[in-house]
Amino acid sequence: MIGLWIAVTLLLAPAASRVERDLDVNARVDGSESAYVQEILRTRFRSPFARFAVLVMTGGPAVSTSVGDSLLTRVVREVEGATGVTKTISYLDARDSIFAPTSAGTFVIVGLDPSGERPDAMVPLLREATRKLTTALRPQYPALRLAWTGDIALNHDIRETSSAEAQRAERQVMPLTLVLLFVAFGAIVAALVPLGVAAVAIVVALGMSVHIAAVIPLSILLQNVVTMLGLGLGIDYALLMVSRFREELDAGRHPADAATSALRRAGHTILLSAAAVLVGFVALLFIPLNELRAVAIGGGLVVIVAALTAVGPLPGLLALLGNRVNIGRLVRRSTSGARTNGWHRWGRFVAAHPISTLAVSATPLVLLALPLRHLDVTLPRSNWLPPSMESAQGVAALSALGAGAVVQELRVVVELPPRNSILSQDGWTVLRRVVALLAADPRVERVQSIATLLPAERFDLTSLSFLPPGSLSSLVSEDQRAAVIEVVPKSNVDFPTLTRLARDTRAQLGSRADLPVGTRLSVGGLPAFNADYEDAIVGRFPAVVALVVCGTLIALFVGFRSVLVPIKAVVLNLLSVAASLGLVVLVFQDGHGVGLLGLHERLGSLFPALPALVFCIVFGLSMDYEVFLVARVHEAWRAGASDGDALADGLARTGGVITSAAAIMVVVFAGFTLGGFVMIKVLGFALAAAVLIDVTIVRVALGPALLRLAGRWNWWPGGR
């Protein structure tokens, strides 16, 4: 078994090393209107700017001067010579105020070859070209700064930064995790074994994800989630198995018998816990977002691999190690038995005072959950990109120029019925009506289409010859049945307002009755994508919650053959999720203590995907400790102990394991709050807070009190 696992790990390790290169960074909402527009622009239009990046130039002379004009000409010439560049458009082509011809700087829109599958792979080539140019120009223009931004540059930087932050988080938490494991076991070898299980789980899960990504595009968000959960769950499951094995050794069993007994008793608990965690990831598959689908696949894989590693090669390794698992022991464990430890005394106290324990422990959970009343899951108003990224600096520079909306434009596609043409009087009339409606919105800076380039009320075929080269193929489809309208919002419009603009535009266009029957108006672009993103999550979140709850109830009913235990576990998990999300609202949305986490201001709102992610992951993680505790209480009760004695014995034997596992998981998740990605920072905080709340309140007080109050009805109809 050990040999098989080594072979699988070595086989998948090369693929795991390619994870940041092979995973996708483009977010999509499958079947959405924005995805439909993106596909139309890709397949039916021959625009040199179907894919584009934005080069922001600051620190040089104003381009309206002869010196600035000369500098911009040299920059554009250098960029046009780079591999994969199809065309550029700048102040040199259109003496327009949109290109911000001030002393502050300007920008160049750079079209890229649409044939490549990975356009963000071109970013290093573009940056190398401008780096050489900046170095050559630095003596003459010491403050000159050329920064690439736009979707493609952002995607490249997100890929690189995400991988770097995942690796940095691993390096930061590993030493402290090892210390905590040593404190838990008091021996070096026993502490190293769970880390080995976690490492195997991460490598195998990432390697499998890369192979799956060759068939189904998976988001780069998967890497951070797999690393977080691989460390947390891999150590959790291994810690439970190693603790049980050492317990059997202390009882005088032969190593092989001790490993067999540990597998028989702890293996069931591990697999049941993994099944409960897996339910949450399966539910995420029902939200049609490639990011959440990637989290579901990566998270599900790492849960399965971690559990199978803990019940597969780990017992064999422990049998081979035997008493050598205690090598490096510097702390002697007590041999006086579980009944003398503090957890046993606490269990006796809870058994004697269940109602008062229930009241005291439930109060902080309810208070923490209260901020959920004003939860806002729209996009945050402030910039959440890591400031170290060049593309994020480019976005900030564009905003400073008053041109930040250039990368936030809406793209409206007008499709006429069959046998109708945009290049006819009827098609021209339809296009002008739509353009007039869009331009009337006070949030819109400008609208561009073929009807604005040729602003004539009557269509004249001969006037097409006056269009700039390439304009017709960029704005009208090859079959002439569709036209694209580019809507640039005002630069002072924030993210939530942009999303509302996309929704309002769709509503206005959908209510037009003065257009020919069969005319289709579709709204795409980044703001429209954000609207589709929010709708996809909000519309399916109730179904996801119902699926997770029902799946967990079934898994626990099968595992414990009980009706009351699954219901109690679900209620407690819902409380844990509500309390942790309430704390996230209090800190990140309202801004209480947010400065301690490296943010300069409150977010004002949270990310649309966050509640679904937190709910599905936390629900499963909280179930871990519920299963650990209830399984030992059930085991003692089946052996003939009274309800109170079974509760005290279960807490005595699992309290230390649960506390150690939770402390390690809190450290792992907290390590991801130190990075620059705000989304990962918030997720890491939410998971760390959930585990901390769960282990300090729910599993050691609230849950045991409910177990004591239910008594023998906990195990109905299974019996002893």
Image: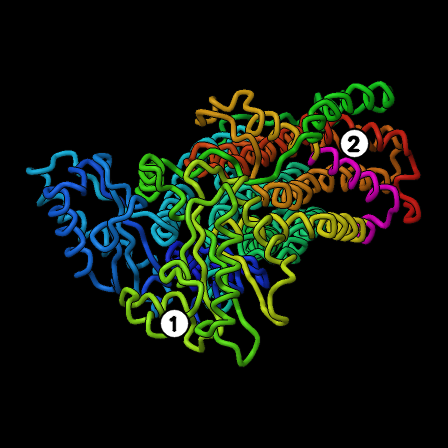
In the rendered image, the quadrant that contains the N terminus is: bottom right
Q: Secondary structure at mark 1?
A: loop
Residue 465 picture quarter = bottom left
Badge 2 local density, few (<14 within 10 Å), some, or many (20+)?
Answer: many
Q: Residues within 10 Å of mark 1 (few under 14, many from 20)?
A: few
**Vertically, is 441 above or below 28?**
above
Report which residue position mark 1 lands on.
Answer: 460
- Residue 223 sits inside the magenta stretch: no
Identity, as a three-letter code, of the amino acid under mark 2: Gly
Which residue has dot 2 on it?
A: 703
Decide whether the magenta segment is chiefly helix, strand or loop: helix
Q: Residue at x 36, y 50 (%)?
A: 150
- Tell me which numbered mark, 1 or 2, is placed earlier along the sequence: 1
Q: Residue at x 23, y 37 (%)?
A: 102
Give x and y (percent) for residue 238. Answer: 58, 44
Query: In the structure shown, which secondary structural element does the residue marked by tag 2 occupy?
Result: helix
**Is 624 on the left-hand or right-hand side of 506?**
right
The reply to whether discs 1 and 2 touch (Cβ–Cβ < 8 Å) is: no
| Amino acid of disc 1 | Asp
Q: Position of residue 621 (x, y in %)?
A: 65, 41
Residue farthest along the left direction in this orientation? 139
Which numbered tag is attached to residue 226? none
Looking at the image, which is closer to me, 464 or 292? Answer: 464
When the figure is inspected, residue 309 is found, relative to residue 344, above or below; the finding is below
Residue 405, can we see it?
yes
559 part of magenta stretch: yes
Q: Residue at x 44, y 67 (%)?
A: 458
